[in-house]
Amino acid sequence: MKAYIAAAYLACLCLPAAVYAQTAGTPPGNDTPPAITGVTISGAVIKPGTYDFPAGARLHDASVTAQINAQAWFLGAALLRQSAMEPQQRLKVGLLFELNANRVHALAVEDAELHELITRLYRAVEAMPVTGRTVAQLDPLQQLILSNNPLLENGDRLLYPRKAEQVRVTGAVMADCVLPHDPSWQMLDYLKACQRHPLAERNSAYLIQPNGTWQTYGIAYWNLQPADVATGAIIYLPPQPKRLSPSTRGLNNDMAAMLATQYQLGGRFSE
């Protein structure tokens, strides 16, 4: 009996898009719900292109249609959504405002080191595109779990790169460092390999994983936390909060959130 229930459950997860359309809130009557249009799938896939799907289609339908290549790097793959563009545009504008406020603050308190660092970060953020990247499970096998298989949206873009072999360190460093990934290294090892800025925070740093998730970790000897630094990750070493303008205490969190949308910084997206 248990085997029968499990088989029935798996069959439900693998329903074709046409069936999803019937179970995803299709209104009663004869009206045909609008199709999902302009879904672009590229990178390490056998059938790249732009596709239309019936209403109710999900992420797994796109993965199956494009036939993801065996060399695709699922952890670093990216789902770009038009619905995420406006919130990320607001994030970028707000972050630039915070950075500019700190440039003014640095001039007011005659802090040349802070002004130099913040100006460099401002220019870096100014050059960052608004991508619309949304955290999503892009491994087709994991998408068989319904919670990992959201509905597609018009204009979705799915990018499947091949695996990166690097880790980037940015933020309060003298210059960004792109280092070879070493599975035995912790965050502190990468930070030691990149020259810190005099205003670098000593107690914590941000780890942005290649799937777009991020978290802070202790990096001092008294609060050191283990962290699994995946290949393609970005480590953001923040400026010391006490040196920043009191009106911009959220700057470092906003910086990490913005970096999490910049999938090109950590992975291989040249194909």
Image: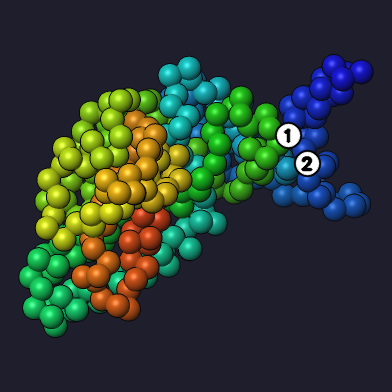
Image position, residue 48 (x, y; %): 49, 28
Label 2 CA crowd tier, 10 Å (few <14, some 14–19, many 20+):
some
Quarter-of-image position of residue 239: bottom left
Distance of label 2 from label 1 (alpha carbons):
6 Å
Describe residue 220's horizontal placement relative to residue 217 as left or right. Answer: left
Measured from the top left, where is residue 236 in percent x and y?
29, 50
Residue at x 48% of width, y 20% of height: 69
Task: Give the residue number, with chain letter if any, for mark 2.
Answer: 21
Q: Position of residue 199 (x, y in %)?
A: 16, 61
Query: Which residue is rendered at x = 34% and y = 38% of the image?
Result: 233
Q: Is residue 210 above or below residue 110?
A: above
Q: Marks 2 and 1: CB-CB under 8 Å?
A: yes
Would residue 154 be seen by someone viewing this image from the given angle? Answer: yes
Pointer 1: what residue? Answer: 17
Q: Residue at x 81, y 27 (%)?
A: 9
Quadrant in the rendering for residue 105: bottom left
Depth check: give the residue in front, 138 or 29. Answer: 138
Residue 93 seen in render: no
Other-residue count near label 1 (Cα within 10 Å), few / some / many at <14 / 14–19 / ≥20 = some
